[in-house]
Image (cartoon, helix red, strand yellow):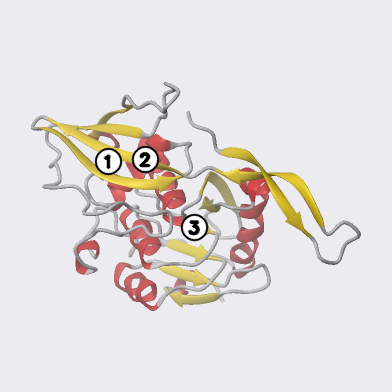
Amino acid sequence: MGRLSQRRRVRKFVLDSEYPVRDKEDVLAVEEPLEIRLAGPSGSLSYSVTMRTPGDDFDLVAGFLVSEGVVWEPGQIIAERFCGGEDEEGRQTFNVVQAQLRPDVRMPDRGRAVYTSSSCGICGTDSIESVRRAGHHSPADDGVRLLPELVAGLPARLRAAQALFDKTGGVHAAGLFRVGDDGTSAELVCLREDVGRHNAVDKVVGWGLRSGSLPLAGTVLQVSGRASFELVQKAAMAGIPVLAAVSAPSSLAVELAEESGVTLIGFSRGTGFNVYAGHERVLS
């Protein structure tokens, strides 16, 4: 497996200091391309290339395929493996993953038109309407209920578990919390970090698929950063009823949350939050 972080020498400038310029070592989060290949009875397809932080790559691929609507249950992916790929020194790069699909799973007609950057989860799709797809795990009827105090405390719990962020300060996180029956407690069951928000979410969704937990009913997905359209789409495809973010949602994210039955929470920062869609799940 590739490295999650690397050390680099930097020149640090601190203006209000006795020593305003000095050389030091800094730790950076690794960002590398991952090619996703699909294999089935009719052959193989290079489906997409995404920029990600190495680690939990099988989860990433599985979650990405759930988000794309290619698969929705564990048995549809027979196996995943790293394909051959070496750097200039002959070392395995672990930057190509092939997912073997079950024979009855329909292969996409073609791959993504462009690569997916670490800042965008739906680059290369033909239109916005093409990602407003009907999923197999609708969160609309999920009866989960939450106390406001529980919601407000999730960002701090997410931050406390971010080991890679502690080292680098340069990654996003997505944490899946399973809510107790009375809405007063929640257990962190999966946390993933990545340079891309959407990658972190795909890694969580992929964990759910590979562990046989989809749909992820009765859960809250707490994310760092903002709540974008693609994060709501990914939550809806996985059957996650509540998506909470520490920053703002976009207008399109709110519209999709209302359409798909996802409770969308923004500006959740410990002392309060805004509910933009599905407010009935948060107990007043």
Relative height, residue 36 to residue 138 (above, below): above
Q: Nearer the viewer, residue 22 or 164?
A: 22
Query: Of the residues under marks 2 and 1, which one precedes in the sequence?
Result: 2
Expressed as whole percent of the image width and height from the top left, the position of residue 19 reads 87, 56
Numbered label attached to residue 73: 1
Q: Residue at x 43, y 54 (%)?
A: 118
Which quarter of the rendered picture does the C terminus lie within?
Answer: bottom right
Give the camera-side residue of 115 and 278.
115
Q: Is 62 on the left-hand or right-hand side of 18?
A: left
Q: Where is residue 266 in the image (x, y as percent from the top left)?
A: 52, 72
Pointer 2 residue: 34
User: How many marks overall?
Assistant: 3
Label 2 to label 3: alpha-carbon separation? 28 Å
> In this picture, is 50 found above or below 156?
above
Q: Are marks 1 and 3 in contact (CB under 8 Å)?
A: no
Residue at the far top in the pictured view: 90
> Can you tell which quarter of the image residue 260 is in?
bottom left
Where residue 220 is drawn, which disc sits there? 3
Q: Nearer the viewer, mark 2 or mark 1?
A: 2
Q: Where is residue 108 in the image (x, y as percent from the top left)?
A: 15, 46
Query: Label 3's element?
Result: strand
Pointer 1 or 3: first along the chain = 1
Q: Where is residue 225 in the image (x, y as percent from the top left)?
A: 53, 63
For disc 3, the neighbor class at 10 Å (few under 14, some 14 to 19, many from 20) is many
